[in-house]
Image: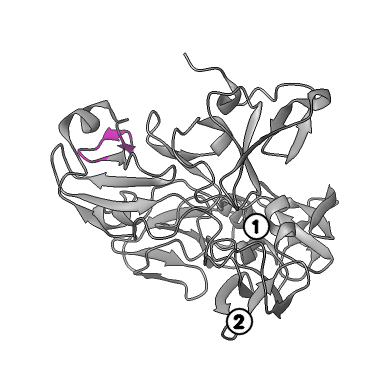
Amino acid sequence: MGAFNARIGVLAACLLMAAQASGYTMEQMCAQWSGEGYVGNPSNCRAWGYCKGQMLVSWGTCPDDYIYNSQTGICADASTTICSTSATKTCESAASPMYVANPMNCTEYCYCDGKGGLEYGACQEGLYSASSISCIYANSCPQDTICRFMQSNIYVGDPDNCGSYIACLNGYGTSAKCADNLFYNAATGMCQKASVTCNGDDSNSGNAGQFTVGYTNSSGCPADYFKASEEITVDGEVQDYKYVSDWTTCYGFYYCANAGATGVWNQCPTGTHFDPTKGECVSPAAYACPHNRCGNINNPFMAVSDTTCNTYTVCSTGATGNCPTTAQFYDEIHNICTTKNPGYAVCEAAA
């Protein structure tokens, strides 16, 4: 495996921001699955949700400190089941030595000594792959897939490519397309001849055609943007590099080695937006992005910034609409119109 190193390498930092967990909610997972059954809770390895009719209809927690096994759909003993949300939880219960991924940082792995102890290591180049138990070069986190918290041997819609599907196996996903002129319908789990959702586009997430991961821009790190961006701290030490917004998308940012350097473009995990005031990826509701808020998000609607959540965007068409006067606020986290302002950052009035 190589020597442990607590410092994240610069290449790894270029590839993915540290401390980012899976960007999918249980609601988003249910929306892509035509079947009925359980999914894991990305924020609690003991918890689960139940999908039916593409909706999250119930949720709960495993008893007696059992871990919910997302791939088998059952609660299992912690000593035999990897916790998908906490390497610490896994190592506390591991009965024998093992390597596991750090679910909060794709550049790191964790060694469990089988006695409750743990030690972190960092990939010097690339990202840690839990399936191959090794560091690999990749443009996105190998664990950042919608299949991570879903059952094995099922097909789901691809959140990033409307009309395509993903085959889930043991927590990993393989994206594929239907035959020519056919689209995958997440509601039926079948390929069909027409898709009103996609409207002929290959993506309904707002990502298409703007940037690719690794794209370089000689003017991506202007001195004023670099100076205004949040400092990056690793092991208590302030780093020379920073992450700077691309000021075009809600989810893209440049890795900048220093002010005026050539920027290397990267994007936040699906379901998150880049907050330049924090230099990290956050919930879209926590930052009122002034650009296309549907980008990188698999929501049918998104609140419009500076409207106190009175107006929403229809992501498939770009049109805007309003909730009824009896429930005038749009809550984009729960996808409902409500009588009370949800209080998210995006719902606040402009200064």
What kind of element bears circle 2?
Answer: loop
Is 233 within the magenta? yes
Q: Position of residue 120 (x, y in %)?
A: 43, 54
Task: Assess disc 2: are there few (<14), some (14-19) or many (≥20) residues with their C-alpha within 10 Å of its C-alpha.
Answer: some
Amino acid marked by disc 2:
Cys
Q: Which residue lies under the disc numbered 2?
A: 178
**Residue drawn at 47 percent across, 76 percent down:** 132
Q: Position of residue 16 (x, y in %)?
A: 38, 53
Q: Is residue 296 visible?
A: yes
Q: Quadrant of residue 239?
A: top left
Q: Is residue 78 visible?
A: no
**Residue drawn at 61 percent across, 22 percent down:** 308
Q: Position of residue 180 (x, y in %)?
A: 56, 85
Give the label on residue 22, or none.
Answer: none
Task: Tell whether 148 sits left or right of 225.
Answer: right
Between 50 and 112, the one nearer to me in the picture: 50
Q: Quadrant of residue 168?
A: bottom right
Structure colour scheme: one colour
Between 1 and 303, the one nearer to me in the picture: 303
Q: Which residue lies under the disc numbered 1?
A: 83
Between 143 and 245, the one nearer to me in the picture: 245
Q: Which residues are magenta?
A: 232-242
Label 1 vs 2, first from the N-terminus: 1
Q: Position of residue 24 (x, y in %)?
A: 62, 53
The answer to whether 320 is drawn above or below residue 207 in the figure is above
The label nearer to you, 1 versus 2, is: 2
Q: Outermost residue toward the bottom?
A: 179
Task: Assess disc 1: are there few (<14), some (14-19) or many (≥20) residues with their C-alpha within 10 Å of its C-alpha.
Answer: many
Q: Quadrant of residue 195?
A: bottom right
Amino acid marked by disc 1:
Cys
